[in-house]
Image (cartoon, rainbow, N blue to C red):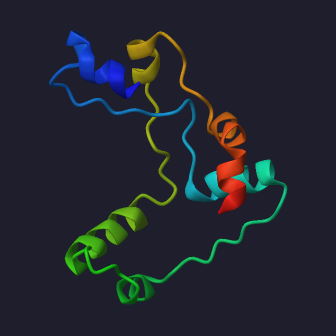
Amino acid sequence: MAADLLTRDPHRARIQVLTGPASLRLRDLVAVVADVLGRPIAIDPLTPEQAVLRRPAWLPEPVLRTLLAAEAAAVGVPAPVNNTVERATGRPPRAFRDWVAANRADFAAA
């Protein structure tokens, strides 16, 4: 996909938003990985204050707070889905479950 977008004229100098075939929340993504691996995966959400305390040095605190505010505002709002991948490649995007299954060994090692 990346090579196609970088080398074909119709895509040059355009911002392309790539999505899969479905809008998935973080909990949905984790549930898919857990199901494919056949083991539970716990989600331990952080409060904004905990996130600030654990902030990596390279991430400025105001940027983190902006990201946290945007995430909080988007709760319950599905992410958009588009057909950019299919238009660019002629093939439908791969489902997240299929991608996880194809890369199961990488997830199992983590």
Q: Residue at x 62, y 39 (%)?
A: 96
Image coordinates for residue 102, horizontal then vertical, percent:
69, 36
Image mark count: 0
Residue 96 seen from this side = yes
Image coordinates for residue 7, horizontal then vertical, percent:
25, 17
Image: 100 above or below 33: above
Image coordinates for residue 52, horizontal then vertical, percent:
35, 85
Q: Which picture quadrant has residue 19?
A: top left
Q: For this rendering, which residue is in front, 92 or 37? A: 37
Is residue 53 left or right of 25 when viewed as pictured?
A: left
Is residue 52 left or right of 41 when viewed as pictured?
A: left
Residue 28 seen from this side = no
Q: Residue at x 30, y 22 (%)?
A: 5
Q: Which picture quadrant has residue 10?
A: top left
Q: Which picture quadrant has residue 49?
A: bottom left
Q: For this rendering, which residue is in front, 98 or 51? A: 98
Residue most extreme to the left? 13
Is residue 77 left or right of 2 when viewed as pictured?
A: right
Image coordinates for residue 55, horizontal then vertical, percent:
35, 81
Q: Which residue is drawn at 46% across and 44% down?
A: 79
- Look at the image and tell me in which quarter the N terminus lies: top left
Q: Residue at x 20, y 11 (%)?
A: 9
Image: 33 above or below 92: below
Image: 101 above or below 59: above
- Look at the image and tell me in which quarter the C terminus lies: bottom right
